[in-house]
Image: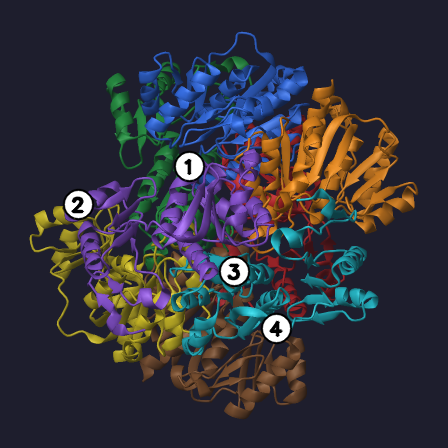
Chain colours: A purple, B orange, C blue, D red, E green, F cyan, G yellow, H brown
Amino acid sequence: MGEDKIKDLGIAKLDYDREERTGFPEVVFCERKMDEHLVKIYRDLYETNGSVFGTRASKEQYEVIKAVFPEADYNPVSRILKVNASVKTEGIGNIAVFSAGTADIPVAEEAAETAEYFGGNVVRVYDVGVSGIHRLLSKQDIIDTANVIIAVAGMEGALASVIGGLAKVPVIAVPTSVGYGASMNGISALLTMINSCANGITVVNIDNGYGAGYVATQINRLAER
Amino acid sequence: MGEDKIKDLGIAKLDYDREERTGFPEVVFCERKMDEHLVKIYRDLYETNGSVFGTRASKEQYEVIKAVFPEADYNPVSRILKVNASVKTEGIGNIAVFSAGTADIPVAEEAAETAEYFGGNVVRVYDVGVSGIHRLLSKQDIIDTANVIIAVAGMEGALASVIGGLAKVPVIAVPTSVGYGASMNGISALLTMINSCANGITVVNIDNGYGAGYVATQINRLAER
Amino acid sequence: MGEDKIKDLGIAKLDYDREERTGFPEVVFCERKMDEHLVKIYRDLYETNGSVFGTRASKEQYEVIKAVFPEADYNPVSRILKVNASVKTEGIGNIAVFSAGTADIPVAEEAAETAEYFGGNVVRVYDVGVSGIHRLLSKQDIIDTANVIIAVAGMEGALASVIGGLAKVPVIAVPTSVGYGASMNGISALLTMINSCANGITVVNIDNGYGAGYVATQINRLAER
Amino acid sequence: MGEDKIKDLGIAKLDYDREERTGFPEVVFCERKMDEHLVKIYRDLYETNGSVFGTRASKEQYEVIKAVFPEADYNPVSRILKVNASVKTEGIGNIAVFSAGTADIPVAEEAAETAEYFGGNVVRVYDVGVSGIHRLLSKQDIIDTANVIIAVAGMEGALASVIGGLAKVPVIAVPTSVGYGASMNGISALLTMINSCANGITVVNIDNGYGAGYVATQINRLAER
Amino acid sequence: MGEDKIKDLGIAKLDYDREERTGFPEVVFCERKMDEHLVKIYRDLYETNGSVFGTRASKEQYEVIKAVFPEADYNPVSRILKVNASVKTEGIGNIAVFSAGTADIPVAEEAAETAEYFGGNVVRVYDVGVSGIHRLLSKQDIIDTANVIIAVAGMEGALASVIGGLAKVPVIAVPTSVGYGASMNGISALLTMINSCANGITVVNIDNGYGAGYVATQINRLAER
Amino acid sequence: MGEDKIKDLGIAKLDYDREERTGFPEVVFCERKMDEHLVKIYRDLYETNGSVFGTRASKEQYEVIKAVFPEADYNPVSRILKVNASVKTEGIGNIAVFSAGTADIPVAEEAAETAEYFGGNVVRVYDVGVSGIHRLLSKQDIIDTANVIIAVAGMEGALASVIGGLAKVPVIAVPTSVGYGASMNGISALLTMINSCANGITVVNIDNGYGAGYVATQINRLAER
Amino acid sequence: MGEDKIKDLGIAKLDYDREERTGFPEVVFCERKMDEHLVKIYRDLYETNGSVFGTRASKEQYEVIKAVFPEADYNPVSRILKVNASVKTEGIGNIAVFSAGTADIPVAEEAAETAEYFGGNVVRVYDVGVSGIHRLLSKQDIIDTANVIIAVAGMEGALASVIGGLAKVPVIAVPTSVGYGASMNGISALLTMINSCANGITVVNIDNGYGAGYVATQINRLAER
Amino acid sequence: MGEDKIKDLGIAKLDYDREERTGFPEVVFCERKMDEHLVKIYRDLYETNGSVFGTRASKEQYEVIKAVFPEADYNPVSRILKVNASVKTEGIGNIAVFSAGTADIPVAEEAAETAEYFGGNVVRVYDVGVSGIHRLLSKQDIIDTANVIIAVAGMEGALASVIGGLAKVPVIAVPTSVGYGASMNGISALLTMINSCANGITVVNIDNGYGAGYVATQINRLAER
């Protein structure tokens, strides 16, 4: 890796070698970043890449960025804050994103929009939790045609196991912090997914929709290359 | 409760009032009991009740009891050790016992035999884990005709949630210690079941087949009275 | 299940087949739902069912719904928000709800009102924690006449074990998040109840009054059919 | 503390000042001690104090000590191994030891014999778990006449809370490792006792009968001085 | 216990038999109580007992009570809110309260004022944590003259073990939620105290100054009777 | 799924539809299976598929199977027990398996042999833990040419994060139970991997080499189709 | 230690013997201190030592202190609040502080400024997390010339292990609470560091930059004496 | 690092560059190594370095190595197995090793012998737990003259905090798995040490005497260079 591809903003080292090295451009994790730093980072990335994609942005951060980039686009559900990063009309492959409940949709959307930004076609199937299994079973065709599946679920997180048994392709399980009491902010769903009796399931961190969208993109690209 | 119904064997207080008070005779939890104490308890219960039903018995304990009661009957899978406690031919009602994997069968059998001993009809459906969901769906008729369902599962324990969504009657979920790594000897399955997104599910302790059989009997009796 | 009975509101899939399939109408879990979504769901359910029953509603959500349905009824203790869902005068059977402390009453009321909404007679016995055991013992007649008992307790959660020893019928234990320090927001009470030395006890998630009311209704109905 | 009262055996520093400083002679914790070390320690304490009291001794350690001190006395239940440490016929005061189940008796006996060795009168009430509350209530007179009470319980450990509500004097709660599944070797009972809703309860480590007997002795002596 | 001594305020059952049964009057746990309920309880207790003692009261609750009882007395450190409950000038016995750090003082004060309210003499020694052991050692005389000692500490909670080794009398250890990171809001200090290598130590819940003051009073009374 | 493809051996339901449905033949998890059951399952699979592949087999189980199938092949390191399941000479694609320490090799081998059995080319790089980072960096070419990477590590499990930063393709992280003390049998390494700061990492259960080999095969096949 | 060197402010005991005893002056932990107490402590320390150094100060606390000491100096990143405590121009030795991400900088700065205040030369290397390992490797010269290294990292905390493998000198690992989901506020990073496969690593509490700076100073002084 | 300094034995990669890179020769962690591998590694290290130092060796492993190297030296307490690795008569500096109880001595000895093998002078002070604080205080001179201190303690692990308050030099805290019940095999002592209120304390993994000896050597060398 060329050291000279690392640009030191003082507040952060932007890694412009990343796209070449990993095939993915730098993405901004907005949470807990101070306003001035956020603006600095968005500005620098915009100047270099022509577009910026940020996750976990608050409504307040959107206002800040919008003041600088009036064309900024914010989705309050997925909390993704984009500048000039509209999805290409023609994505490649096929990534299916399933969510168990409506409360899991923010995380599912973070995954879906991430995968779209990185160039994949995404099919969304939400609110198909295992307590009404027929809702899920009626989507077998979507399971059968995907290159990779993202399964997002909080509470007991059983969705991933059932999809794992229905699919031939890898299932990326995303536990969410949705739940209460013994869900322990998603630890319970995480454990469920890690212990899944089904094959083909791997797990990312709680609420990590971005991480799931990233890996799904890697797999989708491999399938379509 | 009449104090005079408590018989003090020195090593234990046998509660002969229990059957009248709760509708269930005294049952022996054999695990960790010393041989001489076990014999003493089996002898006393036999003399009073005419039969004895014990759970969590080892093969060694079976040998010990058999030396005293040649007619003793032992099931190495469920680890239930009975003396003169054969199931009546005509049980009441309908209790369905489902298990996720073959490794969960010992716990499922403890539940099933307990329910049978207490006078219920039991239907067994084993090895129908959620990673092959169609195995479970083909048993919808059994789910529809039961008064109460026991769902036994280790690893990620998702079985209970799926059955909960398919049933009108209460589902008693029994997590098992089957699994490895992050299953933490059943804690993971327990959390899954407690956090279930489906309604109608209640949970007992890890591997507590007896407890599930007991509650199922209570519900089955209420339904048939 | 008929797929056509699932109504997709975009923000949620309402399951109008549920009542037929499970015997229970759809109920709204209000917590964390956005105002506009809540109104949409209440409106759709009201138009179809003629009544709506929601749990975990905030005072703010009540104001929002009241603006649309002036007849909306809200209980700040149980946090249940109903529209045209007044309890029938003549419920069936007998469901007893016990709470250990006064701080546990919100959860106990969620359970009690849920059971009433689903058509059961409910008897409430609150503030009978085990540190003053005679308060509980004086209610033996209520224990003896119930079809099913709900035991709600936080802190160390010992109430369920004591009631379990006094009752012939199933006891549904509800741990609450009441407590401090090592109560770990109800995990401690949950563990107590799962490890209960008494028979006939099953457990639901922390603060899950609705779930307990649901299962109690199932059992009560079985007993009265 | 006089340094010269510490006798360095190489393998351990025996603290002969302890009795003067704390009012209690040195006691041997036998578990995991090597045979030769155990003999050395027993010999030295015997020569200085004229008697030895050891806890957590195995049958094998008893054989080793017996070979040196033929008068050694071993209780396989409490696992206490004494040399010339028979209890005086006339103890002082009144210490009540309650246990929930028969499996808790080894820990209860460790507490009881420790308290007796240190000069207290002990009343034992075993197998009075809360699932049969009347067994406990019939012992109110023992609760009323004790200076201090030790409550020993595994599984869900609810015994301490109930006794706490019935007593005027301090209750020392001893969780035991009796149980399975979510009891997590006594952690569950420990949490129950720490979170007790009753006043007057303090807690020692899991299975720490000795520790409970020690504190009970301190309180009993204060009451009788 | 006479049932007629339980006064049902609707919102709570006040236990006027408590003082006779346990030797302690009813105390109010103010935290999370609604204003109107708090006033109702204070009024009723005041009318019956002539004084009220409440713990965990907020400044806001003080304002509410003061509006009704202008003579109400509030300590913002201990958060104790009293009406006509001034300490008698002549307490009995000797209770020593030690705290490790200044941040532990609120909990220590809750313990100390509780013990004083119940009639004991209290000696306070604060800010004597083990990282400056000589501060503690210089208080040996206070350790030697106490009937019972309360040791309050957060962070690693080592204070109790050191005092345990210096004292002849019982040490009641109170872990506090003071600390950060791996202190896990006091769980760490609780574990330290439960595992103490010193004898004579028993433990109450995290931040439970009231509970410690209560038990200390029981022991102090026994010593002085 | 055709129900008729499920063969019920009594002790297990063999799923002969699996290969068609998922692209993978049935594999035997040998651990905790009784000898007679194991033989029955191996025999049935052999008759149907012509070969058998089993994981987590003990040396004793090998002896049992060898008595029936003299050609059985056992690897004591990976604990894989095969009958007629030799790897084809020409696998497809490129799966790289890295292990941190030598103690992690059994899990790495389970992954590698699984992937080979399912038809993939496997490159092994063992003992390249991050404490000697140059050992890993010298293998950049292997990282660059793989379709998918399996990273196996116990103790602190940092290997996955470093590889994640060096790779363009998905990294499947396998925590192992190697370690002691606070490694808590692999929980620590699992947490490390789930929290990885690198992108492209997903995680399977502790010691689940088989699961990693399975998913890697899915990805490798997608890349090569 | 001379007792007379302890100055009792009522609200705290200031330990003016500390510098002589340990070689370090008293430092103020500002978090949760009340304004009036903070002023009192700053005033007393200033009068005695001529300078004050406080950690974990809020912006509000800075305003309070500034009103009294207009020359007060506050760093909102490190949250260190100094009065007349400017770093000497010529520090001794060489302490290197590495941080994994930009979000870890506040903790890293707390460590760095602490070390500087205590007289050490500090070299900072931030944003060199292991997911871009070359950023770290390019700093080998800094690793080689340090007397001691502080490695600050949240999320999975792998930085310490990699540095440990590259360094000859002690590495003090500081886990931070940066992360989400299964990071459990830093517990995950703490476990990673405690289980490190590299030698020479020791660990302090989560976010304890001050503690790391303190120990690094001790080591740096030993190296330079 | 030169790749050619890594010698690949097939079963392990021996790192002969380590001594140059880190100043420490390769050490063997014997636990769980197979006999033939152990012999291979000992032989290779002996041929290259002229001596071998191994930790966590069992008595059985000693017999195996002794058969090859009759001069092998084994300490059953520390479980260190050396070949030709006798300590030089003249070590440098001053490393003090303190242990709380006699049961902690094996870990303390592993630390002490490691430090001696790496060339340091070691002073041992064992059985000075905080429950008899004067035993520790009488060793102030040893604390005052050490370059670095290792504090080894199980159970509640308070020793490190007290020594931290008495010392000017770094204290390396080693929690041990000594204890029972809530000690959770050393997790409790680990938490105590991480949360220590004293400055200058850093922590290594449970029972990691070797790791402590290693870091202590690094510091001791820095102090003496």
Disc number lying in front (2 or 3)? 3
Give the residue type at disc 4: Glu
* Secondary element at tag 4: loop
Q: Secondary structure at mark 3?
A: helix
Q: Residues within 10 Å of mark 3 (few under 14, many from 20)?
A: many
Q: What residue did someone put label 3 on?
A: F222
On screen, residue G89 versus residue D50, left or right, reads left
Q: Which mark is residue F223?
A: none
Against G140, residue B7 (above or below) is above
Residues B103 and H158: in front is B103
How far is disc 2 from disc 3 in space, using C-alphas?
A: 41 Å
| Tag nearer the camera, 3 or 1 | 3
Q: Are marks 2 and 3 in contact (CB under 8 Å)?
A: no
- Residue E158 quadrant: bottom left
* CA separation in Å, label 2 and label 1: 30 Å
The chain carrying label 4 is F
Q: Earlier in the sequence, mark 4 or mark 3?
A: 4
Q: Residue at x 45, y 32 (%)?
A: C178
- Rendering coords of residue E215 (x, y %): 46, 36
Marks 2, 3 in one chain: no
Circle 1 residue: A103
Residue position marked by numbered label 4 in the rendering:
F90
For badge 1, the amino acid type reads Ala
Front in this rendered view, residue C22 or D96: C22
Sequence order check, earlier mark of 2 and 1 = 2
Q: Nearer the viewer, mark 4 or mark 2?
A: 4
- Within 10 Å of disc 2 (Cα), the crowding (few <14, some 14-19, many 20+) is few
| Quadrant of the frame with the C terminus of chain B | top right
Where residue B115 appears, as percent x and y from the top left, is 75, 32
Give the residue number, with chain letter if any, for mark 2. Answer: A70
